[in-house]
Structures are given as structure tokens and as C-alpha cells.
Image: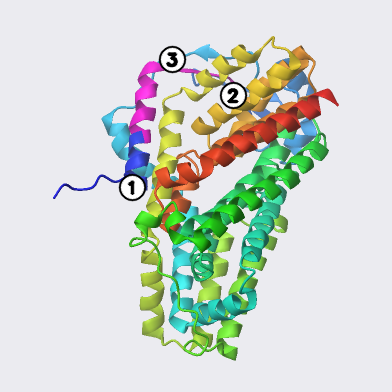
Amino acid sequence: MKKKLSFPSAFTVLFLVLILSAGLTYIIPAGGYAKILYDQQSNTFTETFPDGTQTVLEGNQETLDSLGVANDISKFADGSISKAVAVPGTYERISQNPQGIREILLAPINGVYDSIGIILFVFMIGGVIGVINESGAINAGIAALSKATKGNEYILIIFVTFLIGLGGTTFGLAEETIAFYPILIPVYLAAGYDAMVCIGAIYLGSSIGTMFSTTNPFSVVIGSNAAGISFTEGIIYRLIGLVAGLVIVTLYVINYANRVKKDPTKSLIYDMRDEAHEPIPVDGEAVPFTGRRILILVIFVLSFALMIFGVSSLGWWFEEMTALFLVSGILIGFIAGVGEKKFVNTFIAGAADLMGVALVIGIARSINSILENGLISDTILYSLSNFVSGMSPNLFVIIMMFVFMILGFFIASSSGLATLSIPIMAPLADAVGVPRDVIITAFIFGQGLMSIITPTGLILASLEMVNVTYNKWLKFVLPLLGIMAVLAIGVLLLEVNL
């Protein structure tokens, strides 16, 4: 019998992209911009040139003005700009540093090291979910929720998409959404939907939120600081895009969800149903919703609320979030009455279930490392900046959005892309008579569009959480990507011409 061909796993996709990226380091000329980094203790700038040599400069406004860096010194002094900033007009070719077989083999290992914060967070979430599953709280909660929403299951899609979109636009809720999949996937399956609906609500909600950022410190605030403007400039247009984008995405996901609910064979992953998660039984009598189970779910939900508050208001990052869920898991285990040995074994088994997700995150990071070490990211930026210079304002902003899409593939970090590219791109806006806030809008739109599909970002880790292959995701999301691109262009032209 002839074996049926199937799309490769997330790991194979990432390794293919890794090899392709390494190949580009042989083709694209190496080059770099000089970069300045502010030292708050000595009140000085260290300028690092492409050849590696350094010089120390006075940490004042005169230094920034002389370098052509359009920033206020106060932004460096108060820590708003903490990363190295590229100096316009300093690009130069340097010796090639191609990434060979040794670098390709070491890259995934280094990628895991670099991503250890989020990887430990993922393991902790898996452990906590394992303990909650053992208590029966998830089964009981889903049974109760299914009864409460029967006939109106679409409310789950609206609620999750808008809530996560709000987190994305305000404080950059993205990697943290990994924690939502284990708890929400059985909810959507019990509602008669498929795993694609779950990732559509969670991942697209986050993507649209970050794409139309309003106060997101990791993109629009850092980018505006790098351009020398306030992040409130252009915010009204991003708000317009945010509302329209969330409405479009929600309707898109609901339309697909309704088709699947009516006829399961319409599911894009119907042929993968044997590999997908099985729906949790929703028989309320078989899984009683006791006071203990209600308390367990309340603690779990409060953990997410505290996590969101900590990230948005207390400066938390993965260390604090991981510690939070460790405490939450221990408390839940105590309330559930799970013995010490059973708790440890259940926790470890739950963490082990997410091993694949953790490795995908590390390998995705390795691709960025290959491109950085290959010294080609600055060359790509330099070439694209030359390409867009001298265009008419309307054409300029549209092309600029697609430029940032391309850069977003090579530099997945929004803050890293902002500090590298905005100081170079912002002066180009002055040359064509476009306000600098339009550059920031084009930046977040372009990177936001790319984040929806790029394998170097978070999408493959998210797909691994719900056992969906990359090709199925592309088939689901590409029509929506085209719609969002049209919306983004419309908002950009509105901002330029009003």
C-alpha cells in the first residue's frame, strides 16, 4: 500500500528555514551600521563600529544631534531606550561571516539557551494543567460552561478574541498566550468546533492587538522613542484599525466555526482528527462541579489575572510569571488533595506533554541567531532603505509597510527591529514629506502582518500546542491576511492624507 504523503512537522519546517537562512549568509553581503549604547552609570555613549572597534562619547543631546540620531537624551537617561540604536549613514561592508554546518548544528542548542525563560514558563504551565486535569476541575468546568453557552457558543470566540486583542494592543500580550491553549482547546472542542477555531481566537486576537498597537511598550513606544516622537502621535488611526481588525477577525473565525459546527467535514483539519485532541466529556453528572473544583478554577483564573497585571504594571517577565504558576500549581495540588508523590509525577507528566512546544520555541530562536551572526540583517535594512527613498508619499508608506514585513521575517523581535530600523527609516519620511508617526504605523503594521505567518515567530509553537500543521494554518489564514493587508493600507493612506 502506497504511503500517504503528509506535510512535515513544525520541527522539519524550522530546520528547513534554518538551513535556508544559513545559505543566505553566503549570498547576501555582510555589513553593518555603527550602533550606540547608553550607560546610565557613567552617563556616556559607547559607539560600536561595524568592524568591532569602539569609542566612548559624552552622554548628551549634542552627541545625538551630531550623529543624526533623532532622539531626546532623556529617553536614554530614563531607560526608555535601553538597547543599542543604529546610527544613520554609517553602513559599511564588512568581512563575510557565513554560517556553515557547525553553526547550523549549534544554533538550535544556543536557541534553547537563549529562550530558557519562555521554555521554563511553558513547562510550568504544562505541569499546572496536569495537576488541574488530575483534579477533574477542567472537565467539570467545561461541562458547566457548555450548558451555560449552549446555542450561543460563538460568545466564547468573541470574548477570547477581544480580550486577548486588548492585551496585545496595550502591553504586547503575545508569548504569554501559550498558557491559554491547554485550558481553552477542550472548551472549543466541547462547543463543537475544531482546534483551528481555538488558535484563530487566541493567536489572531493577539496578532491583531499587537499589529494595531496603541500603548504596547515593546513596539509602538520603543519605535516612537527611536523616531524622536511621542507614541500618542497617530494613535487615533491605530485605534481605528484595531476596532476594524478585531471585528473582521472575529467574524472570520465565527464564520469558519459555524461551518465546522454544522458539518465537521468542513474542518480544514478533518483529516487530522485522529491526531487532534479528543473533546472532554460534558456530562455534568459524571463530572460534578463541586466547591473544591470551583475553587481550583478560580485560583487558576486569578493566576492569569495576576500575570497580566504583573506584566502590564509591575514590570514582570518570564521569571516572575514562572514563579507565579509554580506557586499556583502547589496551591491547586494542596486544595485538590493530591498526595506529594502523585503531585510530583502528575506535574512532571504535564510538563513533559509540552516538551515539543518548548523545543519549537528554541529552534525558532536559532534562526534569528544564524541571521544575526551571519551579519546580513543590516545589509537587508540598508538595501531596503535605499529602495524606498525618493518615492511619492502614498507609494512610500505602502512600500514601507511591505519593507517592514520583510524585515520582520529576519528580525522577529519588535523591540529589536524598532531600535535597529526606525533611526534609519525615520529620516526617509522627512525626505518625502511624511510625518514620522506614519513610519511607526507602517512598522507595526508590517511586522504584525508577518507575525501571522512567519515560522521564525510564535506561530509554530502555537500550532504545536493544538496539533495543527503549518500548511493547514496557511490555508486557513491567508485569505484573512489579504483582508488585513488591505485594511492596513487603507489606514496608512488615511493617516498620510488627513
- Apparent side of residue 46 relative to residue 476 in the rendered image (left or right): right
Is 478 colored magenta in this rendering? no
Q: In this view of the protein, which residue sits in the foreground, 128 or 276?
A: 276
Which residue is at the far left? 1
Q: In this view of the protein, which residue sits in the foreground, 474 or 16?
A: 474
Q: Position of residue 190 (x, y in %)?
A: 50, 71
Q: Which residue is drawn at 62% across and 51% down?
A: 205
Say whether disc 2 or disc 3 marks the residue closer to the N-terminus: 3
| Whether label 2 touches label 3, CB < 8 Å | no
Q: In this view of the protein, which residue sits in the foreground, 297 or 149?
A: 149
Q: Is mark 1 on a helix, strand or loop?
A: loop
Say whether disc 3 or disc 1 marks the residue closer to the N-terminus: 1
Numbered range of the magenta stretch: 17-34
Q: Position of residue 493 (x, y in %)?
A: 76, 26
Q: Quadrant location of residue 166?
A: bottom right
Is the residue 291 above or below the residue 467 in the image? below
Q: How far apart are marks 1 and 2 (CA)?
A: 29 Å
Is 21 colored magenta in this rendering? yes
Q: Name the residue under label 1.
A: 9
Q: Mark 3 points at which residue?
A: 29
Q: What residue type is labelled 3?
A: Pro
Does the image show residue 417?
yes
| Whether label 3 touches label 1, CB < 8 Å | no
Q: Which of marks 3 and 1 is in front?
A: 1
Q: Is mark 2 on a helix, strand or loop?
A: helix
Q: What element carries label 3?
A: loop
Q: How many labels does the image show?
A: 3
Is the residue 200 above or below the residue 302 in the image? above
Q: How far apart are marks 2 and 3 (CA)?
A: 18 Å
Question: Which numbered tag is attached to residue 403?
Answer: 2
